[in-house]
Image (tube, helix red, strand yellow):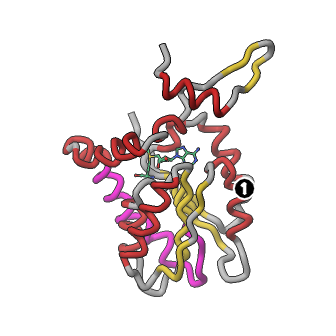
Amino acid sequence: MVHEMVFKECIKNGYSRESAHRVWDIASHDLLYITPDLTHGFLNLKKFSRYKTNVINRELELVKRHAPKFLSAFQEPFNLIDLGSGDGTKATTLIKSLPKHVQLRYCPVDINRQFVDISSSVIHRLNSPSVSSIKPVVDKMQNLADIAGMLRNSKYQKNVSLLLGSTIASFEINDLLFELSKDMFRNDMMIIGNGIR
Ligand SMILES: C[S@@+](CC[C@H](N)C(=O)[O-])C[C@H]1O[C@@H](n2cnc3c(N)ncnc32)[C@H](O)[C@@H]1O
């Protein structure tokens, strides 16, 4: 049984081929946020106190405690590429924990335009001296090789990517890391947050 909404989305997205078979991936992450209701459903997870304490707050603590150790040494402005940005809560915490001399351009990347809009405006309202500008990107993170190349320029030569909220667990990990690493340069960085069971 496939819900009609998911069924329609699968038809719209098309199929891949495995030998003689046509495959529609109903486990695809893209299907989790296809309506505004579903998007709000994800954001409402924050209100579920056990999830907030055991998942969200733990990662926020880790980000706060460790990210500045890596990023404080950066003297040049860099792109902070927030892969699967969600509502920008994690990036907010990270940015707040940085010393003022650290300069970055915030680049939320999400397949869901609503999340890109929300995270962009949350960071804009933060009014942090560390954020020199915001460059929203509505796209699949699997296209990071192109996105990272497009974002790198003479002012922002370095990319720091965030892959937080156990997003990696929704993908085939090696495939995703291979795609994401394609346009990483030597001094680029990726900060991954994932639950361990
Ligand atoms: C589990 S949430 C994590 C959100 C945020 N990083 C956090 O830690 O709260 C996954 C996010 O990834 C986005 N997403 C899912 N698949 C994606 C893809 N292929 N490309 C870009 N974003 C994707 C979703 O829209 C959602 O915002």
Q: Is residue 37 above or below residue 26?
A: below
Direction from residue 20 to residue 186 in the image, left or right: left
Q: Position of residue 1 (x, y in %)?
A: 48, 13
Q: Is residue 17 above or below residue 45?
A: above
For disc 1, the marked residue is 145
Q: Position of residue 15 (x, y in %)?
A: 70, 26
Q: Position of residue 111 (x, y in %)?
A: 56, 49
Please identify the residue farthest to the left as the structure is shown.
49
Please identify the residue farthest to the right as the structure is shown.
19
Q: Main secondary structure of the magenta part?
A: helix
- Would you say residue 98 sits in the magenta stretch? no
Q: Residue at x 35, y 53 (%)?
A: 59
- The residue closer to the viewer here, 148 or 4, is 4
- The residue closer to the viewer here, 149 or 12, is 12
Q: Which residues are magenta?
A: 56-80
Q: Type of residue at label 1?
A: Ala
Quadrant of res 138: bottom right
Quarter of the picture holding the C terminus: top left
- The residue closer to the viewer here, 8 or 185, is 8
Q: Position of residue 66 (x, y in %)?
A: 41, 64
